[in-house]
Structure formats: C-alpha cells, structure tokens
Image (spheres, coloured by chain):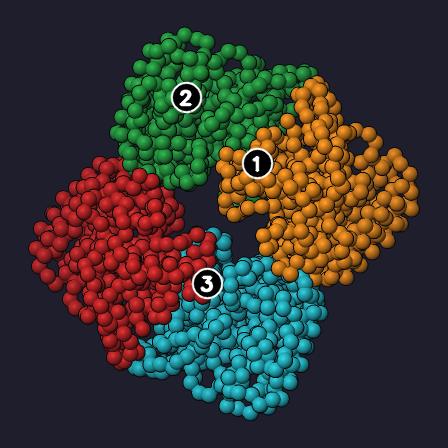
Chain colours: A red, B green, C orange, D cyan
Amino acid sequence: MLSGVGLDTIKTFFNSVRSRTAELCVPLRIEDYVPQPVEFASPPKWHLAHTTWFFEEFILKEHLAEYKEFDPDFGLLFNSYYQSLGQRMIRTSRGSITRPGVEEVMAYRRYVDGHMQVLLSQVLSSEVRSLIEIGCNHEQQHQELLITDLKHTLSLNPTFPVYKDGFDLTRSSSQEKGWVEIQEGVYEVGFKGQGFCFDNELGRHKAYIQETEISKALVTNAEYLEFMEDGGYGNFILWLDEGWSWRETNRIQHPLYWHKVNEAWMHFTLEGLKPLDMQSPVCHISFYEAAAYAEWAGMRLPTEAEWEVASADLNWGERWEWTNSAYLPYPGFSTAEGALGEYNGKFMVNQMVLRGASLATADGHSRPSYRNFFHPHLQWQYSGIRLAK
Amino acid sequence: MLSGVGLDTIKTFFNSVRSRTAELCVPLRIEDYVPQPVEFASPPKWHLAHTTWFFEEFILKEHLAEYKEFDPDFGLLFNSYYQSLGQRMIRTSRGSITRPGVEEVMAYRRYVDGHMQVLLSQVLSSEVRSLIEIGCNHEQQHQELLITDLKHTLSLNPTFPVYKDGFDLTRSSSQEKGWVEIQEGVYEVGFKGQGFCFDNELGRHKAYIQETEISKALVTNAEYLEFMEDGGYGNFILWLDEGWSWRETNRIQHPLYWHKVNEAWMHFTLEGLKPLDMQSPVCHISFYEAAAYAEWAGMRLPTEAEWEVASADLNWGERWEWTNSAYLPYPGFSTAEGALGEYNGKFMVNQMVLRGASLATADGHSRPSYRNFFHPHLQWQYSGIRLAK
Amino acid sequence: MLSGVGLDTIKTFFNSVRSRTAELCVPLRIEDYVPQPVEFASPPKWHLAHTTWFFEEFILKEHLAEYKEFDPDFGLLFNSYYQSLGQRMIRTSRGSITRPGVEEVMAYRRYVDGHMQVLLSQVLSSEVRSLIEIGCNHEQQHQELLITDLKHTLSLNPTFPVYKDGFDLTRSSSQEKGWVEIQEGVYEVGFKGQGFCFDNELGRHKAYIQETEISKALVTNAEYLEFMEDGGYGNFILWLDEGWSWRETNRIQHPLYWHKVNEAWMHFTLEGLKPLDMQSPVCHISFYEAAAYAEWAGMRLPTEAEWEVASADLNWGERWEWTNSAYLPYPGFSTAEGALGEYNGKFMVNQMVLRGASLATADGHSRPSYRNFFHPHLQWQYSGIRLAK
Amino acid sequence: MLSGVGLDTIKTFFNSVRSRTAELCVPLRIEDYVPQPVEFASPPKWHLAHTTWFFEEFILKEHLAEYKEFDPDFGLLFNSYYQSLGQRMIRTSRGSITRPGVEEVMAYRRYVDGHMQVLLSQVLSSEVRSLIEIGCNHEQQHQELLITDLKHTLSLNPTFPVYKDGFDLTRSSSQEKGWVEIQEGVYEVGFKGQGFCFDNELGRHKAYIQETEISKALVTNAEYLEFMEDGGYGNFILWLDEGWSWRETNRIQHPLYWHKVNEAWMHFTLEGLKPLDMQSPVCHISFYEAAAYAEWAGMRLPTEAEWEVASADLNWGERWEWTNSAYLPYPGFSTAEGALGEYNGKFMVNQMVLRGASLATADGHSRPSYRNFFHPHLQWQYSGIRLAK
C-alpha cells in the first residue's frame, strides 16, 4: 500500500491517474459522454463523475477540514451500487441523466482535484493514503470500463465511428509458443508485497495445485475461426448447457463486434471497422465461448490459482483471460466497514474470474494476484482464451 | 391541401414549422439531445434529423434538380420504420447514436432548409406542394414527441431538471360544465375541407351514431384523486382484464410523473416538480386508467365518431382524450405507394384512438377529424379523460 | 331466449349439451385431462368442472331449495376470472391442480346434473330459464376450447397422438366461388330474434356500411402456400408492424401445426399427422398472418358489420374468420350485475373479432351476430381468412 | 463400485431401488403423474420412464442379446438433456406429454425390469456392473426429484392436498450444538473407497484448508424467524447483489411454502399445511437467502472442502446444505465417452454446491464426497443452512 511511501509518490500517482482519464476523453464529443448502451455499461460522463465522487465522498468530506461538497445531488446521481434501494433503481437510467452536463462534471473534477491538491500538501495518515490509493485504482478500473463501454456504444452505430486512429486494442505482439509446467504441491496465492491490492486479493493463502501445463500463447483469431468453421457454434456437445441456451436465445454465431462483409471477416475496433488480424488473440469472447472452444480443442481453461502460479512465466497483459474459477471469497475474506465494504463482496456469485489485463487496462494496474470478474455471457470486455491441459 | 394555395403560403408554413422546432430546442443542452429513455420514445437529435431527412428523401432528392445528398449515412440513421429489417433493428439503439452530433444535425437542417428555399422559389407541382405539406405536418407531430419524449428523459433524473420556466403543459383554462347532446342518426365523419389531413382521416364517410351525451369538461385531478382515494387502483371489478395485469406487473398506483412528497401530491412538469393543481385536467393517464375511471364513474369513454360529431361544441385542445375506439382503417383506406405508404397503416392494431390535442401540440396542427393513436398502456403523452353516457 | 319456451325444450337442451361434453371426452385417457399446455388454454378437467360450477354457483345455489354445495373448494378451483385477485393468480397453474381428480369431477358433474333434473321438473321463472340457457351456451363455448386446447396439448407430443380417428376438423366441403355484394346504406347489426345471445351481441343497432364485396370462399391451403412461396413471411411491407415483430420473435414461418416432412407439408390434426389438403381452407392462422395475406392479395379483411350483413349469402361455419374489427362494446352495452357481469366486457381491448364458426363449434351454437374474439397473435383456434374488397 | 462385488448384491440393489420408486408412487393418483409445475421440475411419469429408459438405453440395448426395444418413441420422450437439439426443446413441455400414459409407463418398467432379471442372471462384465450401479444411483436421484417436484405441484393447489400422512420431510431429530474445528493443512477430498460415486466426485485430490469452525447444528426455523423479524429480507446490506434483485423481482418475503395464516406461520408439507415447528431446521431456502442469513449472523457458509473434511463429525443427512462453493470440475475431471459423458459436466457453471442429504434422499445414497448442485435462486429442494466461522 501507499500508506508507507512518500507523499510525492501519492501525489504523482493521483495526478497521473486523473490526467489519464482526461486524456482518454480527448477524442470524445459531448454527445459521446451520454449513452448507456446496455444495462451493464455506463456512460463516460458517469464514469468521470463517479470516480470523482469517490474522492469527494470518502476522502475530502471526511479528511479535508472545511471541505464544502460541490453539489449534494451528485452523491445521488453518481454513486453506484452503494447504499439504499431507491438510489440504485436509477442504474438502468444512467443514460438518461443529461444534467449535470459534461461541463459541470468537468468542473466537478477540477474542483475535487483542486481540493485534493490541498489535502495532498498536508500530513496524511496511513488511512488517508490508503483511501487515495483505492480511489486511484478505482478510477483506473473505470478508465477501462469507459473504453469498453464506449466501444459498445460506438459499435451500435452503423456508420462505425472511429474513436481514435491508432487506438486499436485488439492486436498484440507476437506470442511465444509452448507450455508452462506447474509441479504438484502447495503454493501460495493471493496478494503479496507492499503495494496496493483490492480486498478480494487478500489474504495470501496456501492452495494445493495439481500438476498441469498452461499455454504460453493465447488462442488466435485464426485458431478460433477453425473452431467456427468446424461447426463449433452448432455443436451441442461442446457447450455448457447454459452456454448453449445463451447462444440459441441470442442467435450468437461469432465473437462480439465481428461482421462478415463480402465473405471476409471484419471487426469493429476503436479505429473503426477493420479486417480481422488472424495472428492476434481472439477477443470479445464470453466464458461460454471460451469453454466451448477449450472443449473442442480437447483441453480446458486454467483455474485462477494455476494461472497465478504460472504467471511469472506467461507473457500476459494483452487480453483478459477467462479462467474456470468462479468468483468467490478467499479464505478469511472480510469486507471493510461501511459503504466501501460493498466494493467487491456483493458480486461473489454467478461470475467467473478473469486474470491478466488487456490493452485497455491502465499500465501497472494489474498484477498476478488481480481478480477481474464478469458474468459468463458477457463479451464486451477484451476477453480471450488461454488453454491448459 | 396546400396544393391549391399560393407558394407564399407554403413557404411561410414551411419556415414557421422549421423555426418552431428550433425554438423548442433553445432550452436544450447538447447532452439533452442524446437519450432515448424508453423504446417508444426517441432522442431530440433523432427527431431533428428524422424530420429533415423526410424533406431530403421525399422532396429534394426527387424534385430539386442536381440536389446532392448531405450525407448518405443519414438515411440509414434517421429513417424510422421505413424499409428493410436490418435498418429497423437500430430502433432501440437510437440513444446510442452519438455521431453525427448535434452540430452536424443542425448543419443538416440548415443545408436542407437552404435547398428548400431554392425549391420553394420555383414553380411547384401540386404533388410537390402536397409532399411539403406532409413534411411540415410530420415535423409538427415530431415536435410534440420531442417534448413528450424529453419530458420522459428529464423525469428519470432525480434532480427534476427544469426544461423551461413557464412551460408547464399540464394546466389549462377553466372548463365549462355540462353535456353535449348528440341525436341518433347518420353523420359524416372523416376529413372534409381543403386543408391538409393524414391518410388515416380519409375518406369522409357516413356513420350511424346512437343518441348520446358527451361531457364538456375533462376529468380533473381532483376528480381523479377521488377515484384513487376510493380505492380505484385496487378494485379489480373496475378494470379491463389486461389493465389489471398491467397495473399489477408495473405496480402502478397513480398517473405517470406523480410523486407523493410529505403527504402532498406533486407532479413532474417541464418546469420541474410542482404541486398538483386540482382543477386542471388529469394527465399522463393510460387508456386502462381512463377506462377504469369511467367504469368507476358509471359512465364510458366516447367513441371517436361521437367525439368528432360533438367536437364543434367541445372546448378541446388542452389534452389528448382517450376514446373507446380502436385505431382501424376507415372504409376505403388506402396507403400511398412506396415508403410514404408505411406512414399510418402499419400501426392499425392494438392501439386506441385519441382525439383532441394537447398543449404540446403545434397550434393549428390538430382538427376535429384528427386521429392520434397509442397503445393502451402508454402514459407519457398529455392524455386525459372525457366522459360520455 | 329460452325464457319463453317450454320446459321440455330447456331440459332437452341442457341434457344434450351436457351429453355432448361427455361424448367429447370419450377418447380421453385420464392423463389427457390434466395439462394446461399454454397460459391461454385450460385442461379438459378444468373445462368440465368450470362449466359445472357455473350451473351450481349461479343456478342451483340460488334457485334450488336446500341445495347443498358439492364441495366448497370447487368454487375456488374452478371459477375463471371471476372475483378476487388471490383466486385469479392460479390461472397459470391450472395444469398443476391434480386433485380433485377426473373421477371426482365426473361425480361433481353427475351430482349437479341430478340436481338440475330436479330443478328442471319445477316451475321456473324466466330468470332461471335464462340462466340455464346461458349456462348451456357457456358450456358449448368450453366444448370448443376443450377441443382446441387438447389439440394444442397433443401437438406438443412428438409422437403426434390421435385423439379420434375420423375427427379431423380442418377439412371442409367444397366452396362456392364468387363475391357477395353489399350496397351502401344503413343496416341493422347485433342480435335479433327470440333465441339466446350473449351480452356482447346486444343491442341491435344501426350501422352505416359502404359498398363492398365479400368473397364467398375462404382462402385455401393452396392459396396460402402461394403466399408463402412468394416470400410472404419475409416481406416486411406486407405486415403490420406488430405482426412483423411477432413473426421475428417467435420465428414463425408457417401456420401453427404445420410440419415439413421430406419436402412435403404435413399438419397435425386430431387424427394425427396428415398431409395437408390443398383445397381445404387454411387454418390455425393468427390475425397478423391473415392481415399479411390480405395485403399480399391486394384486398382486405371484412369488418364484422360487413360480415354480418353478408352472412345470409355466405357458406359459413367451417372456420372462424378474422375480421378487421376490434372487439369493442356495442352502443349501449351494459354488463349484468355481479359476477356474471364479468363475462365479456373485461376483454374489450386488444382483441380482434372473429365471425362464423368452426367445425369444433357445437351445432347451432353460433349465429350471424355471434362475436368471437382473440388476441391477434393467437393461432390455436380453427381460424382462417375470408377476403373483402 | 459394484463391479467387484457379487451378482447377488447387484441384483438386490437393483431390485430395492426399483421397488422404492414404486413405493413412492403408491399414494399417487394418475393425475398426479402428469404435471410439470415449473421448468426445472419434471412430472412423476417422466421420472419413472426416464430412469427406466436409462437401463434400456445404456444396458439392455447394448448388453442383453436380442433385446427388443419396448417402444422406439420412448427414447425421444424420456431422455433428458442428452443428445440433439430438437429433442431437448421439449423440456418445458414434459407436462404436456399425456401419452404414453401411466399404465404404459408402468408396463415399460415391468418390461425393462423383467429383462434386467435375465441380464442379472448372466455373467456380467465389470463395465456392465458399473452401468447398472450408475443406473440405480441415477434412479435414486430421480426418486428425490420425484418427491420435491411433486411437492411443488401439490403446493400450487390451494386446497393443500396431502401426499401421505406421516410423510413430512421437514422435521428432523434434535441437533447437537457446538462447533467442529478444522486445523489448517493439506487434506484429501473427493471420493475414496470401493463403492459407487459420480464422475464429479472423482478424483480424490489434495486441497489446502485454512483453520475453521463449522457448526454442528443446522439453523432452525426459530433462528431464521429472528432474521426475518429483524428485517433481514429488507436489508440491502446483507444480500448479494443478485440475491437482492431476485428477492425484489419475485417479491420474496420468506422461505418457499410458508404461509402466514391468522398471524401464525404455517408451511405446506407432504402431509398438507401444518404449523411451523420452530426447532426443526429451516428448509426450502435459496442460496441467496442462506448467504444473507449468514451475513446477518456475522458468519459465512462453509466451502465444500471444509464440509467434506468436517463431515465425519457432523450429524448430517437431514437437510441439503448450501456451501459457498461453486459447482466446478475437480482437477483432472473427465467425462465419459458418449451420452453418459453429458451427465454432470454440462452444468458446471452458475450453480452452487450443496452437501449432505435430505430426508427425501434415498438411504445410503449420499456420502461425504457427494456433490449436489443447484442454481442459487432455487428453493424447492429441502435445502438449509449450516454456518461456519
């Protein structure tokens, strides 16, 4: 945690995170800030305000003397799942909240940033340092969601708008082939070290792992197309029962954002519609698709513990990787008191863990013990497949 | 129709309609143009572009020599139900179309308006005059939807934003009491005269009407509250079977936009949250609620033919009035050739006719033969109750 | 009404209706009495008990001295929409009510029949005679539903069970070609005469009808196949907007109960799976399909008033015929006091009128003024198409 | 496995299992065999036939010379999720399959039982012995489902029918208080020994468990009522996010089958409606409710590994116990070849593991390594709560 490091480090971190959010918004027009394309996504404006509200609510209001709230309504509008029922009911209406507008939200950010500078010039308790660190990491998570949610919004536009040239997060560097071997035995998993982590990575604990091999390379678009051309989407035997229903109900035939244009596979990216690069890792895959692919390949997805143990030897960070582990509490998991305690524990059912990071993840944000999690049917993250056997 | 009148009249009409749309948008911020709060509503930006596309598609492209389309994508983005499947699928995603933005849509309007001035300075066939007239009336319809859809969007904001002070469309002038009597006999209904009408008002035809009486006054908030306080929402016997299910499923307890605050009834208006005015006509009522109220009052809703015959003696125009007539074709109804033919006929099932006009309706837009129509569960229009017996 | 006729006539009518119900059940096995295949259908056992409950509740309990209720629970189990909420909630669970069993329901029928014989040997007021008549007609309606609901149940069985050999209600006699002409003018519609009718046919009233022609023949399977082969199910322009959505959501490609087996069209009947007879009227058609077909044929469906006026010259009774009239109250419609008043009025929204009768309808049950009604998407009745122009 | 034991043992086992099924059906009337009350349940008739089909399909057809299939249609009607899409689509229509009827299904059972006696008099390979053992255990699973599904059906009957006097599976013997302590370390979990187990219990493997304590007693109705009276169902903070939505959407206020009658809590049992016994373990609880209760109690649910390690010291078998483990494959999990391979693996997502057994479970069927699993919202099993800390 940052609680033990110097104030300059904290300040630098805070300012760099806040700047990166602003930078991500440079290509946006005001209209882009508004839509909530699907229930599980949020508008850019909401991400901007919500992350700011976090600093105001948990840090400035509690720890900066005489801090005056920017606008009392903002707590109601920009908290997330925290707190009472009435307020949560607006979740699906985030895209209808046009006021405050972008300019007011930007003013809110400047106001909070300004007061944070004041706070950051003071002597801070380790508790406050820790809260700032959480706030920064929280904002980094929302930076990634801002990108993936925005991509979903733009994808619904039949003109395939470009977010930013040169900003295609679906490619990655060439991949090393081969397998990482893990020997059977007791390993430690969970966060270790001095830096920051989320509550769901604590505490480090022993786990028994069987002998296994994990692929160094992610499954590529070329390999996934083989599965498709082999009739993978129509072969009941390969799918989890619920995956098959999902596929049937939603008439899924390929990864999200793929389009067949004149017999060639294209995909929508933040650079617009582009030909699929066959050597890049397959992307925007649900857990159901990942599991079906693994079954077709005669292999399986790794568990999160296996992944974590192998991570030192993996080249990861280019794509969130579905594991076959459900998102559940680690031994001794406990939630913080109050609203911060609602952070992760609330969601520990019916979701699968993803490990790694994607090109949309802020640099340095992820780590080997990092636990990302989504419902098994969701495709809108930069999610892919790493096989184990 | 305008086809027989002078060019100046057409030009004046066109310009006044286009100006009114612009005027309605003055209080809007860019963010307000984007959301589609529910499937049956559309974003202001879409209304602005769609009405413009109508002039471009059906008039300028066909009838102005060398007209060059503003942007070929706009047809795809801003047509409505017209034409092919693929394009219609974006209907629920209108709120996610951030580009083109408001400024481009405004430029589109200016571009089309400019070319319309050119066209309007030429000798126009009666066909073209007629198309312009349709386009203007079409835009007036969308002006009203722009207002009602925007109200729905703003209503989802827990801060109850104000669209414009002094712009509360729920009040109306004091109402004359008493009953209009209709004698039994053959009457003519449907459009007559030289002016404009929609295809669904044609052709004028004879209808046999029984003796009846129609209230001169609309049901007021005070009267509706009596129904509520008498347990109307919980009394199965008063409701249509489907109305009861709708009420149960959606937990409906009062008209749309009503809020009980500290034991007093308030309602959300375009001026923000305000106390309910007891003498104003009740508003934002579904057909189901209107029918249950009429049953409770021991009366019924008028048919559209009765309403039309009585209209000369009614003070109408302050609130759309649910009739007990289903929206069906008049004898000899025929649709125009091509896409314009899809205008009204497509919707002639499962909807009920409303007659009159509301304070959101453009001046002079409605007339006694005008047939508005919505699904019986919808509440977001300025819809109220007139009784018959 | 029967109120003016002799007691023998009433008795004969009662006994013949009750016998026909029993006769329809002869081919049933106990298991067949139980299922409710879809929400809008009911189990045979429920039809048997519900029609009996009607006689007990409205006649025996009120008008037979010292009548003792068979079982107080039966009112709760076998009323329909009548009365309070709690009881209606079991509507979708009718197929789960295994007790009382078939034998007890049969005993209930015998018990009520026995007491009805006692009553029918007494001097009856015209009110009681009228109630008996309603009860008999009510049971005839349920006889038809018993058949159509049972057909739906059996159709879900991939072994295509036979209800009864020789009992295929989809065929009909050869049809006369040509058109019935109606002259423009005032006509009377609604029930006339002395016999029985339902409240929704009253009162007879004048209606103004335009000049029109109505086909003497129903549309045949051969003709409907032409529409299908011409791409009718895929041609957006032919469909009502809601019909198109219905078709899309439910992946409808042909009438209900049709199966393509080895390139030949078969259909499921109460005699099992059989080849489609091309000259028989098309059947198990929704209103949406009927309307699309009419549009394709360049014609329209008749209104119910037109149909009624033409009925004297039509050969009808072999198939329920969708009209383009919504099911709405006739002028002066009023409901009876009490639970009987819930009979028809509750359903006067979002349904379309069908005229005629089908081969499943009890002999003599229908008449020219008879108004049947169903939601526009339903296909499970023996419903077909008659064109007008 | 039985593969190593004597033929007499197998025969005895087979016959006793088949007899118990028959015995469970003694109180049933023919009508009771038919309904499928909800999608996740099945009719008794289906359970009877499906378990029989298993013996026919996997054993008799493969391993009894000259065996002639009873009826080729039965495979289509009574397989479950096995095999192709078309056949699976009838899953929700099981309650509509009235034919074959109960008598034919009983004849099917006799036919298969007779041929099984022939087979059981022959020398059997270990493969065949193993298949018979699977078939018997499979039938025991369906015996339990037969009971719980039937209870659901009867519960929908407002007359609260009695299945069998003296057959109330919700009570249990008095419970020992106190805690079982587990020391931190490596333990073995998964099936061991010679007897039968399902594929999902294999292979036995090492797991690292942290120090923990597990309650010897299950949570009682009295304790659960405390939670309810403390506002547990209305306290957002106690619930998983999805649990809260489930509760809200379905308006859940108490365990399944509970009814408040004249201010006293009753519950529906297989003996009919009875007062709640306060000292019995709470029952018919979803995972969401179990998790909320544990949160309220300041404790947690055990993991399945913890439960298994502690099982030697627990008095279990009176109630299925929700664990906080998701249903996932054990290390090295592999599915059998062919249709039998679809047995368990298909369902390893979005379900939670339950350990123990209930009073509805066949004697001797469960064991410490047994893994039962259901979706977290389901309440219809005899499922309860054991706490850990």
Residue at the image point whose x is 63% and y is 36% from the top: C352
Q: Classify residue C233 as left or right of residue C87.
A: left
Q: Secondary structure at mark 1?
A: helix
Give the quarter of the image for residue D183. Answer: bottom left
Q: Classify residue A314 as left or right of residue B213.
A: left
Of the residues tagged 3 and 2, which is closer to the observer? 3
Report in which chain the residue with disc 1 lies: C
Q: Secondary structure at mark 3?
A: helix
Is residue D137 in view? yes
Residue at the image point whose x is 53% and y is 35% from the top: C238
Tell me the number on the disc at residue C292: 1
Residue at the image point whose x is 16% and y is 48% from the top: A20
Q: Quadrant of the C terminus of chain B?
A: top right
For label 3, the crowd category at 10 Å Cα-Cα, with few meaning under 14, some 14 to 19 and many 20 or more, is some
Q: Classify residue C312 as left or right of residue A220.
A: right
Residue matched to label 3: A236
Tell me the number on the disc at residue B199: none
The residue lying toward the viewer, choosing from D86 and B274, is: D86
Q: From mark 3 to mark 2, how far is it between C-alphas?
A: 52 Å
Q: Secondary structure at mark 2?
A: helix
Report in which chain the residue with disc 3 lies: A
Q: From mark 1 to mark 2, how far is it between C-alphas?
A: 28 Å
Q: Classify residue A8 as left or right of residue B115.
A: left
Report in which chain the residue with disc 2 lies: B
Give the quarter of the image for residue C206. Answer: top right
Residue type indicated by callout 2: Gly
Residue matched to label 2: B135
Is residue B321 in view? no
Task: Give yes or no for contact between labels 1 and 3 (Cβ–Cβ under 8 Å).
Answer: no
